[in-house]
Image (cartoon, rainbow, N blue to C red):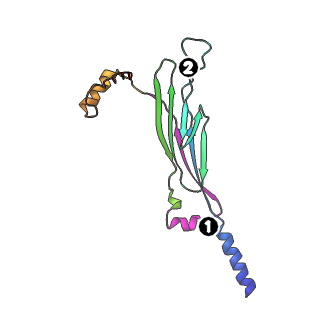
Amino acid sequence: MTALLGALMVLGAGALQCGCVQHRARIEAAQPPLTAPVGDPGDKPTATTVIIVSRIAVDPPATTATSMLPIDLPVSAWRREADGSLARCETRVQTPLAWWQRFPVDVVSDLLPWTWTADAAGEVRLAVVPTSAEADLLSAAQRDGYAHGAVQPAAPEKPAP
């Protein structure tokens, strides 16, 4: 009787170890080629700075993150071109909570002997940030109630006698 109980416990423990869940998020670094700066030929081309969660990278290759839990990767990227223009990208890559991870299907899928993978992919697509004159920005801020007048320079302090 004890041998049968021991065998059932081993089979039960083995069944609980069968299924596996993996979440995989991939960020593609599809960006335009670097441009050479105008002016001094010794200058280096500009580079794209990418922040993935809290990790900063310059011109990174594709990045992949894996986890047993759902993944949520905020991505922020920018580049200052040689002509002075600024390009920026804000995106987020989230792995889905798949149907096979929802009750009651997860009871069965966890017992099956293979790995279930939830994939998500995002791409760094830089878009040029439009520029405008300071006077235009100030008038738009005043119109929208964010500015109350031009900023006056501080008066120089008089030296003590």
Quarter of the figure that contains the N terminus: bottom right
> Where does the image place residue 93, in percent across and percent down from the top left?
51, 45
As drawn, 89 above or below 130: below
The image's mark for residue 111 is 1
Mark 1 residue element: loop
Q: Quadrant of residue 107?
A: bottom right
Tell which of 142 and 161 is nearer to you.
Answer: 161
99 left or right of 111 in image: left
Kind of residue sitting beneath label 2: Thr
Q: Which callout, 2 or 1, points at the residue further toward the start of the chain?
A: 2
> Where does the image place residue 103, in percent across and percent down from the top left?
49, 66
Mark 2 residue element: loop
Quarter of the figure that contains the C terminus: top left
123 left or right of 131 in image: right
Tell which of 25 and 146 is nearer to you.
Answer: 146
Tell which of 70 and 137 is nearer to you.
Answer: 137
Cβ atoms under marks 2 and 1 closer than 8 Å: no
Q: Give the magenta part as a residue range.
A: 102-128
Residue 126 belongs to magenta span: yes
Q: Residue at x 60, y 44 (%)?
A: 64
Q: Nearer the viewer, mark 2 or mark 1?
A: 2
Kind of residue sitting beneath label 1: Leu
Q: Residue at x 60, y 16 (%)?
A: 43
**Crowding at mark 2 (Cα within 10 Å: few <14, some 14-19, many 20+):** few
Residue 119 belongs to magenta span: yes
**Crowding at mark 1 (Cα within 10 Å: few <14, some 14-19, many 20+):** some
Question: What residue is shown with label 2?
Answer: 35
Residue sticking out furthest to the bottom: 1
